[in-house]
Amino acid sequence: MFNEKSTDKISKVLNFSYFAEKLLRWYPSNKRDLPWRNTQNPYIIWLSEIILQQTRVAQGLPYFEKFIESYPTVSDLAMAPVEDVLRLWQGLGYYSRARNLHQCAKQIVEDFDGQFPTTYKELLKLKGVGQYTAAAIASFAYKEQVAVLDGNVFRVLSRYFGIDTDISGSKGKKEFQELADAAIPKKHPDEYNQAIMEFGALQCTPKKATCDTCPLQSSCYAFANDLVEKLPVKNKKVKVSTRAFLYHDIVCGDGKVVRTRGPKDIWQGLTDFPLVEFSSPENINPEDSNLFHELQAFSPTVNFEKEKTYKHILSHQKIFSNFVSFNIPEDYQSALEKWADSKGFLFCDSEKLETLGKPQLIVKYLNDKK
């Protein structure tokens, strides 16, 4: 275990200065040219870190650019309707990040007069800002000596120093955080944090690490002991559940019946169609849906293709979805709108639907119908 009192002793044993120096020399000539790298603007840094959580840089970069274009300042983001923020986020997944992003922007404007807190401890008070994000902002924007700890950093530290503590448990996270805090240099903590994350992303990768050109190879414990593929240790496995959705695509003229997803489930606040959930994909049957029978009152033309299933994989769920479409004569529009309202649904035209934030599964289905 590592603590402040033993940092000097540990530094001599583990040679942190050599480790940091090598990373700082490697970084300038190997780093990717990314828009949030050449700034100390905390808004830009915060926005990039939230977008890149559980998202690859290649996927997140276009979203970052769209957000900066739409909301150049934290005040602009705070004033935006949450529906617009969710719409811009569409396709990134983990939509709680988008809601926290918006709430945090409002908190900064309302509680901090539009200015980001300038210390790690104060940044932790912000909505949706955890230890990693607070450390990133504090070091990148304000050069505070506080270490970041993400998947890349876990991997580099585990391999180089030969630590096999399980990183998925609280003990492992505490041990690695203490090691990361002990290793970060007083000078250039911002560049060091960037360097170790970039090193893990480009050089010390999860698979097929480029050890042959690694500047740390000669003193790397994992390389010397043939443990590169075995470190870090992560024993905790996410339990993945399977869900079966039957969506009701109810069309009348240029309008569709939609709904806003509620709390305590995936895709909170996004727009999809009236839904019935079944016990398994094999059991999906439109005629077992009460909605199916209620809609018969509007003389619909019904279409259902059992074999056309949409699969969507989340970190903890596999979603299998079928769609049954109901084309309803326009004579019934007024009655359909009343029915939709009584169910808590909304009848909206295609133009309005386009502006609403939707799960990627719904977007794919709508695109397939064009």
Image: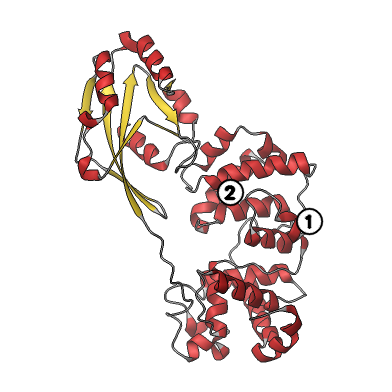
Q: Residue at x 63, y 62 (%)?
A: 132
Quarter holding the C terminus is top left
Q: Indicate the quadrant where residue 154 lies.
A: bottom right
What SS does tag 2 mark?
Answer: helix
Residue beneath the point at 53% across and 52% down: 60
Q: Quadrant of the N terminus?
A: bottom right
Please name the residue shown 72% across and 53% down the image: 42
On the image, the x and y values in percent for residue 21 come to 68, 81
Above or below, 28 relative to 314: below
Q: Amino acid at mark 2?
A: Phe
Q: Nearer the viewer, residue 341 or 370?
A: 341
Write the residue at 67% across / 80% down.
Answer: 2
The relative height of residue 138 versus residue 336 in the rendered view (above or below) is: below
Taking the image as shown, residue 162 lies to the left or right of residue 327, namely: right
Residue 288 coordinates in the image, percent (x, y): 22, 31
Can the viewer see residue 239? yes
- The amino acid on which the numbered mark 1 sits, given as a three-letter code, is Thr
150 horizontally vs 346: left or right: right
Separation of disc 1 and disc 2 at Cα? Answer: 23 Å
Q: Residues within 10 Å of mark 1 (few under 14, many from 20)?
A: some
x and y percent of residue 110 in the render?
A: 76, 39
Label 1 sits on residue: 118
Does residue 73 appear in the picture of this structure? Answer: no
* Residue that carries the numbered disc 2 in the rendered image: 64
